Image (cartoon, helix red, strand yellow):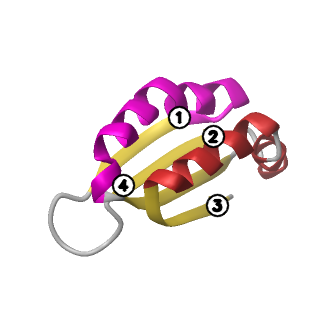
Amino acid sequence: MARLVLSWNVRPQEEAAYYEFIVQEFAPALSRVGIELEEVWLTLYGEGPQVIVSGNAPSREALQQMLETEEWKEIEAHLKTLVTDYRLRIFD
């Protein structure tokens, strides 16, 4: 099993658009490409990224293939317009 961990900070001027995007597009897209959403953490106070999202895939190879789909590339590009400090990590 492989774990995908994403983190970012929401652009203050994009909060309304961000929340609409996450609920209506981002979360469903993760499922469609085969990433099982596991946890979402929000930092309300202190240091660190504002949002951390983790999901699972059957293997590192399967996850890499999922991240190479056009759907993922489009959804990731849209997310990057709404956030700063975007980071993607894969763990075995």
The quadrant in which residue 66 appears is top right
**Mark 2 or mark 1: whose residue is earlier in sequence:** 1
Which residue does the numbered mark 4 point to in the structure image?
51
The amino acid beneath tag 2 is Ile
How much space separates mark 3 and mark 4, taking CA atoms? 18 Å
* Quadrant of the frame with the C terminus: bottom right
The amino acid beneath tag 4 is Val
**Mark 3 or mark 4: whose residue is earlier in sequence:** 4
Which of labels 4 and 1 is toward the front?
A: 1
Q: Residues within 10 Å of mark 2 (few under 14, many from 20)?
A: some
The answer to whether 20 appears left or right of 61 in the picture is: left
Q: Main secondary structure of the magenta part?
A: helix
As drawn, the residue found furthest toward the left would be 45
Q: Give the range drawn in magenta.
A: 12-36
How much space separates mark 4 and mark 2, taking CA atoms? 17 Å
**Mark 4 or mark 1: whose residue is earlier in sequence:** 1
* Quadrant of the frame with the N terminus: top right
Position above or below: 76 against 43: above
Which of labels 3 and 1 is toward the front?
A: 1
Which residue does the numbered mark 1 point to in the structure image?
26
Q: What number is the disc on residue 91?
A: 3
Which residue does the numbered mark 2 point to in the structure image?
75
Position above or below: 26 against 77: above
The answer to whether 23 appears left or right of 16 in the picture is: right
**Mark 4 or mark 2: whose residue is earlier in sequence:** 4
Which of labels 4 and 2 is toward the front?
A: 2
Q: Mark 2 touching mark 1, by CB under 8 A? A: yes
How much space separates mark 4 and mark 1, taking CA atoms? 14 Å
The amino acid beneath tag 3 is Phe
Magenta span has 42? no
How much space separates mark 2 and mark 1, taking CA atoms? 6 Å
Q: Mark 3 touching mark 2, by CB under 8 A? A: no
